[in-house]
Image (spheres, grey):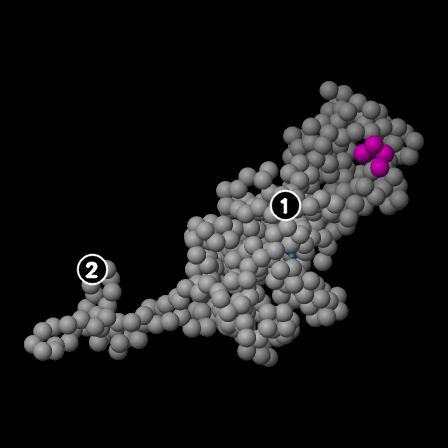
Amino acid sequence: MGLNEMSFDNEIFPFKTNTLYCGDNLKILRDFNKTHKESIDLIYIDPPFSSNDIYTAGKKEKEIFNDIWKGKYKHYIEWMKERIYELYDILDNTGSFYLHCDYHVNAHLRILCDELFRPNNFRNEIIWHYKNKVGRPTRKFLSDYDTILFYSKSDDYTFNPQFVEIDNPLTLKRYDKVDKNGKRYKIYHTGGVDRRTYLKPKSMGCIWEINILSANSRERLGYPAQKPESLLELIIKASSNEGNTILDAFGGSGTTLKVAKDLNRNWIGIEYDPENCETIANRMDYPYKNIIGYDYQKTRKDIIGHEYEEYVANVLGGRLNPKRFRGDNGIDLCVYHHEKYGKNIPTQVKSTRINKNHIILLADAIEKDEKKVGFIVGIGGIIKSAIDEIVITKTDKNITIIHFDKKNLDIMSPKGVIEDKKIWDYYKK
Ligand SMILES: C[S@@+](CC[C@H](N)C(=O)[O-])C[C@H]1O[C@@H](n2cnc3c(N)ncnc32)[C@H](O)[C@@H]1O
């Protein structure tokens, strides 16, 4: 798994509550521990589960996070160990730690955490059972639960018991009265007077029946691993009080942070993907400029670039080059089919005005590809020296480069085939 390029490799991340950090949690937690050991009351983490999957969102299956590991468990567990050790150090002596995982790694993580927290501080194995999960029949039972391992750091830890409504119809029939506060009771007669006996709430057990977010859930943000707020509400209410500080070092879409804030707790979020940080910030009403480790200018520029490539591919009916993020000789190359110019036309998309250098690089790529035509798409026009370079490329190499711009993408698209003459008229304007 790659590290976030934007983490402050040589700078120290300052410890601040009610703050979102963008970067690798290992580096950030190490920095926190230099000055703020034992400062957190409750930690919840929902790390990648080693599920050997890539999580995507939306019709275009944009990658949200990658959970594929070399060497399977060994590498994953080493990776987690470093982080859980840092989390242990930042956790207050009276604090609690919740580790969300599933059947892929729950056994491995349990052993790791038992060693660190010691078995006597293991409090519960919570089973989050989601009844609404559906799946096709396979050669095993449907996995319809996650595991949440709950540890405290010592014997002296906050725990506010949680209760569940009793729904047994026979019990409800016996306790058939409801007072003005909504509490159920029954009447019994003793010594000639009527007395009330209230129905005692049932203590919450370890199997939590909470649905996964459905496609039309109001909470849903389109982030694939988003957990329900009610799940985090239970954990936060049970293991913290107002004013306590809660840390989530694998922020995702920010469910923990949002619920912590709503319940008047202080919060700290860490997430390495800048776009996920934006999702969190939007959800929390938190300004992008206050995300520590996040470079607004750089990220927005990259995102606009990638979004624009997708937009161009849609308009021109093109196929995006999967290598385009890896900087293919500095050229973002897309390939299209054109009725007039043929198949697989190298296309460069720039979210800037086109300059001479863009033309030179594209001409080289076209030549290498042994093609005769290429498209270049920009935003904000083309400068004179680039037009001159297009003419030189045509005369010297017999390569035609056709320029499109956002404004005229539709009229100049291969669907509405443009004649060469019109292109030259366009350049002359
Ligand atoms: C399973 S998701 C968390 C989902 C979250 N609980 C929610 O409800 O939205 C895990 C997240 O951890 C992030 N992540 C993975 N490795 C990380 C690292 N080293 N530092 C910080 N965040 C990381 C991923 O980008 C991903 O968004």
Specify the quadrant that holds the N terminus: bottom right
Q: Is residue 45 visible?
A: yes
Residue 303, located in which quarter of the rendered image?
Answer: top right
- Name the residue at the top extreme: 429
Compared across the picture, whether 317 is left or right of 282 comes to right
* Magenta region includes residue 235: no
For disc 1, the marked residue is 14
Compared across the picture, whether 323 is left or right of 58 comes to right
Q: What's the amino acid at mark 1? A: Pro
Q: Are marks 2 and 1 in contact (CB under 8 Å)?
A: no
Comes first in the chain, label 2 or label 1:
1
In this view, 396 is above or below 90 = above
Q: Residue 149: where, in percent of width, then height?
A: 55, 69
- Residue located 64% across and 54% down the image: 33
- Residue located 66% across and 30% down the image: 408
As helix, strand or loop, the secondary structure at mark 1 comes to loop
Principal SS element in the magenta part? Answer: helix
- Badge nearest the viewer, 2 or 1: 1
For disc 2, the marked residue is 180
> Local crowd at mark 2 within 10 Å, few (<14), some, or many (≥20)?
few
Q: Quadrant of ligand 1?
A: bottom right
